[in-house]
Image (spheres, helix red, strand yellow):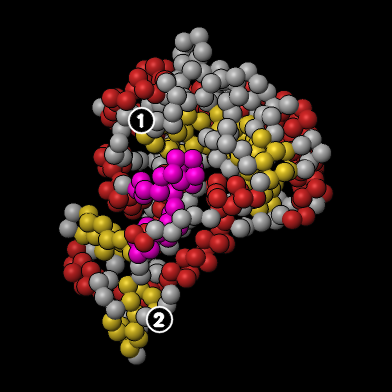
């Protein structure tokens, strides 16, 4: 039986030697397919225009199953709008809580001012009261602990976590939390506490090998930090048995890292590769403002595709799973666009972006009342349509806007996606996951 199908608008074909890799931004990493050399010509022809197919053909069945071929009358743009609305209006509460503005590090690229302010007790109570008053509205609650260095405010984490866990348990609502930390105070005592407070993910930054890390991420007094952080993570590897806990090790790379990528990867693969809970996350050092990063401007990496190509050759047991979030449906969409995601500052200021606390959209009070300027809030949720994005294959991942902060605060609506980077990331993902072969 013949059926009329068309290629999906979200398809991407990436060359790999004499074969090709297929990716669909609506299907994400689970859609990636390898096409063997002998089928390349036919599959490329199939994905180039609308036509009739024999629905008994196994290749057609696989391509339609993975979303590369869709019915000729199927409106993918309408589905994209629907999926975007589903994602941003989900009734799951996500609070990013800044426990403190203080930090014990002085990273060479950091934009923050390291004020010693801790979250005020009345604001801590406000977080708890807000969740208590609104819990019935939400399917689940998540808190991300942020800073400054959030572990300097461990008492804040304790004061909020205990009652919130009780509230969610009594209302039978799932609760989870994660923490982004420099890892220096991730001591065995603190690790055990964090697990008891339902931390399911720990994001730690280690910038390469010891020499480079200690030069980029020293203590405030200039002391090194690499060995202590690694020892803290080894404690998790050797003594924490929870299978629900995962750890991502983020590395902010500069051009100085390029010559040492082999040694960098070998160290973390040897040290943590036997524990599936650990993964690597590699990103370029970015200029988020401030004066410190200016001294590094000559060493910034402006194109990650060469980095992805290099680590693709190195990859062994420990993987770069956090990087692949960018390839999932809606994965490149900033969480600031989510309706029920709020960042809570130490003074109770409510923002949408973790990096724009000076541009609040509201205020949280001790009684749990969150006063929101709905006009300002709407600017973060409702994007700006651009004609050049309408037919882009990547729009299933970015939903046609990447950084609402750039649009709102800097009046910038230019697409910053480097498609050579995306292609290299697709190939890295294809080498990482077990994928089907046509």
Bounds of the magenta segment: 390-417
Give the residue displayed 74% in from the left and 52% down from the top: 173
Residue 339 seen in the figure = yes
Near-viewer residue (377 or 393): 377
Mark 1 residue element? strand
Mark 2 residue element? loop
* x then y, percent, for residue 339: 61, 52
Query: Disc 2 marks which residue?
Result: 73
Residue 185 seen in the figure = no
Discs 2/1, front? 2
- Quadrant in which residue 298 is drawn: top left
In which quadrant is the C terminus drawn? bottom left
In this figure, what is the number of numbered marks? 2
| Position of residue 301 in the picture relative to residue 129 (left or right) | left
Near-viewer residue (273 or 324): 324
Main SS of residues in magenta: loop
In which quadrant is the N terminus drawn? bottom left
Query: Disc 1 marks which residue?
Result: 253
- The stretch drawn in magenta includes residue 414: yes
* x then y, percent, for residue 336: 55, 46
Among the two numbered marks 2 and 1 on one chain, the one whose residue lies closer to the N terminus: 2
Characterize the local packing of mark 2: few (<14), some (14-19) or many (20 or more) Cα atoms within 10 angstroms.
Answer: few
Dots 2 and 1: beta carbons under 8 Å?
no
- Quadrant in which residue 74 is drawn: bottom left
* x then y, percent, for residue 45: 22, 73
| Position of residue 98 in the picture relative to residue 389 (left or right) | right
User: Is 316 drawn above or below residue 47 in the view shown?
Assistant: above
| Position of residue 419 in the picture relative to residue 153 (left or right) | left
């Amino acid at each position: 039986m013949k059926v009329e199908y068309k290629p999906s608008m979200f398809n991407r074909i990436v060359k790999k030697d004499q074969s090709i890799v297929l990716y669909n931004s609506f299907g994400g990493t689970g859609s990636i397919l390898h096409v063997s050399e002998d089928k390349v010509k036919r599959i490329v022809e199939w994905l180039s225009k609308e036509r009739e197919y024999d629905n008994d053909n196994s290749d057609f069945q696989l391509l339609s199953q993975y979303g590369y071929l869709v019915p000729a009358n199927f409106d993918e743009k309408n589905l994209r709008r629907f999926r975007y609305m589903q994602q941003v209006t989900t009734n799951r509460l996500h609070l990013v809580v800044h426990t403190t503005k203080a930090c014990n590090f002085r990273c060479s690229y950091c934009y923050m001012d390291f004020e010693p302010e801790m979250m005020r007790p009345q604001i801590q109570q406000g977080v708890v009261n807000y969740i208590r008053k609104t819990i019935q509205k939400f399917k689940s609650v998540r808190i991300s602990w942020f800073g400054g260095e959030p572990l300097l405010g461990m008492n804040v984490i304790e004061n909020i976590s205990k009652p919130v866990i009780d509230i969610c348990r009594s209302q039978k609502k799932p609760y989870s939390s994660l923490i982004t930390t420099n890892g220096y105070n991730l001591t065995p005592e603190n690790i055990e506490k964090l697990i008891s407070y339902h931390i399911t993910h720990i994001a730690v930054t280690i910038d390469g090998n010891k020499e480079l890390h200690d030069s980029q991420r020293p203590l405030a007094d200039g002391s090194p930090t690499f060995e202590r952080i690694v020892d803290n993570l080894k404690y998790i590897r050797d003594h924490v048995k929870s299978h629900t806990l995962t750890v991502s090790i983020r590395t902010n790379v500069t051009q100085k890292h390029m010559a040492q990528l082999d040694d960098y990867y070998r160290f973390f693969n040897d040290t943590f590769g036997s524990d599936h809970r650990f993964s690597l996350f590699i990103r370029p050092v970015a200029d988020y403002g401030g004066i410190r990063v200016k001294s590094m401007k000559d060493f910034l990496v402006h194109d990650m595709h060469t980095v992805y190509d290099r680590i693709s050759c190195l990859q062994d047991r420990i993987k770069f799973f956090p990087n692949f979030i960018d390839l999932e449906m809606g994965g490149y969409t900033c969480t600031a666009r989510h309706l029920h995601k709020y960042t809570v500052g130490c003074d109770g200021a409510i923002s949408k972006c973790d990096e724009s606390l000076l541009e609040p959209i509201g205020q949280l009070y001790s009684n749990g009342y969150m006063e929101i300027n709905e006009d300002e809030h709407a600017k973060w949720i409702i994007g700006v349509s651009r004609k050049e994005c309408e037919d882009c294959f990547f729009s299933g991942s970015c939903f046609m806007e990447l950084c609402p902060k750039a649009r709102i605060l800097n009046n910038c609506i230019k697409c910053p996606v480097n498609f050579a980077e995306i292609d290299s990331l697709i190939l890295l993902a294809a080498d990482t996951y077990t994928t089907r072969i046509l």
